[in-house]
Image (spheres, rainbow, N blue to C red):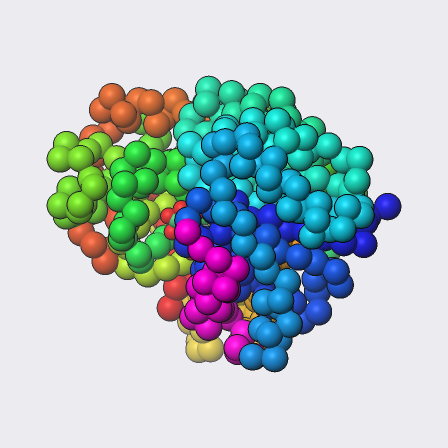
Amino acid sequence: MPATQNTLVIFGATGDLTQRKLIPALFNQYVQDNLPDDFTIVGFSIEDYTTETLCERLHEGIQQFSSHSYDSTHWATFSERIHYVQGDLTRADSLQALNETLNQLENNAPADRLYYLAIAPRFIEPTMHNLGMANMQVQDNGARKVIIEKPFGKDLESASELNDVVHSVFDESQVYRIDHYLGKETAQNILFFRFANHVFESVWSREHIDNVQITVAESVDVGRRAGYYDQAGVMRDMIQNHLLQLLTLTAMEPPASFSADELRNEKVKVLKAVRPIELQDTVRGQYEGYHEIEGVADNSLTPTYAALKLYIDNWRWQGVPFYLRSGKALKAKATQISISFKRPPRLMFDMNIGQKYTRNVLSLCIQPDEGIHFTFETKVPSQTMQTELADMEWHYRSIFGESATPEAYERLLVDALNGDASLFIRSDEIVQAWRIVDPIIKAWETDEGNPMESYARGTWGPAVVDEMLENHGFEWHMECVH
Ligand code: BG6
């Protein structure tokens, strides 16, 4: 039985994530009446804030970053539920004091608690330890759940060790590892599209599909995050998590039910079936001028762009190449998944068979112009036998309105408050995802593999990436970019 009270404790309450994403998301859900009736938000940080000064900062965040129009009446009642506790999460006595404050705020009555670790990775381990020392994981008086932000570890070994640390305090059923891509409406829609429509799922296999592409292009550069990014690079920052998550949703088998474990079992099976990636099937790139950014090492080998080809060794996908690519400082922001179907076995029309057409492509546009495209050949009206590619397109905005898709954090926070872990990453998923990318990261760090390609800002990345596909008679699809 869930408790009637809910307490959300945000560790790192004065940081960027809390101001830009978490509080605007909670506020939007509050305005729409989707939060539990009786909830309290407790911000915790080492910074010298008070409840008033924290509220001022969060208020600015809502005005600046909320996707809904600001409304002062709701803010007045929402802000009454916010409290600030100053303390040091590396000290056990600080968390014991926090626990006492929480008990008081909850009147020592049952309450479900969600601890959100919006903190730098190096603080996760001490926080876990001190939560344990204060017995804050014990579920005698309500549920105790913890959300952990990415990056979860920096390689296979550290992620496995971190799992052990987390499990020394919390049971896996209490742990919510976040990947905000899973909170995107369009990412969730991959499953609805596949499993609520017979027509596509019945051709979703090696018999009909000749390649699958997942592109996550970003126009932003590293910005002021060089300190973090130069240690991470695109493989850790994007591919290990966001792109592999999109891959699992695209390739998984239908789960027996939509329950968190059934769903995640199927996702893990996909990751387990990914064949070790050949170094020659990878491209790494760095945008021009990256070395000049403050915080980037002079001789940095950190890739800001990566493309790779992988295979999923299972019955459904045997032999079908999956191409993944992601990069910063590119021409446009666009996330899309393209399913390229096979050519017809024979063409009786008098057309130039070597041409690019005769391949149907289904593109799921994850962002920013959320929608779906499907391309097909159509006869050009005339006496000839010519065909032309037509694009059947559908956009969320045209059906559901301009601001139809909520921010990813909105959905994820509400799910975690309600105890639904379906859209969170399980420990074995994290480990499998690291298993896939780790050998490539390690090889690149010692400068093995294809050489680092330089690319100009504002382009689509290194030109050699096109060759990766052209060698197989394929091309990259960008139907979602206009
Ligand atoms: C984050 C990465 O996880 O995702 C950032 O750390 C990246 O580098 C961001 O810019 C992209 O998220 P979105 O939702 O803008 O595609």
- Residue 390 in sight here: no
Image quadrant holding the C terminus, namely bottom left
User: Does residue 99 lie above or below 273 as drawn?
Assistant: below
User: Does residue 162 lie above or below 179 as drawn?
Assistant: above
Residue at point 80%, 48% (across, down): 109
In the image, farthest residue toward the right: 1
Along the line of sight, the residue nearer the viewer: 373 or 369: 369
Relative to 329, 238 lies left or right: right
Residue at point 52%, 25% (across, down): 162
Residue 464 location, quadrant: top left
**Range covered by the magenta-colored residues:** 48-71
User: Does residue 334 lie above or below 284 as drawn?
Assistant: below
Mainly helix, strand or loop, the magenta region? helix
Query: Looking at the picture, how far across and down is residue 407, in whole percent?
Result: 54, 62
Residue at point 26%, 44% (across, down): 226
Say if the magenta span includes residue 287: no
- Residue 294 in sight here: yes
Say if the magenta span includes residue 67: yes
Along the line of sight, the residue nearer the viewer: 265 or 9: 9
Along the line of sight, the residue nearer the viewer: 151 or 168: 168
Query: Looking at the picture, how far across and down is residue 479, in whole percent?
Result: 43, 61
How many tags in the picture?
0
Query: Looking at the picture, how far across and down is residue 4, in whole percent?
Result: 81, 54
Query: Looking at the picture, how far across and down is residue 314, in whole percent?
Result: 61, 28
Residue at point 22%, 32% (across, down): 301
Relative to 173, 286 lies left or right: left
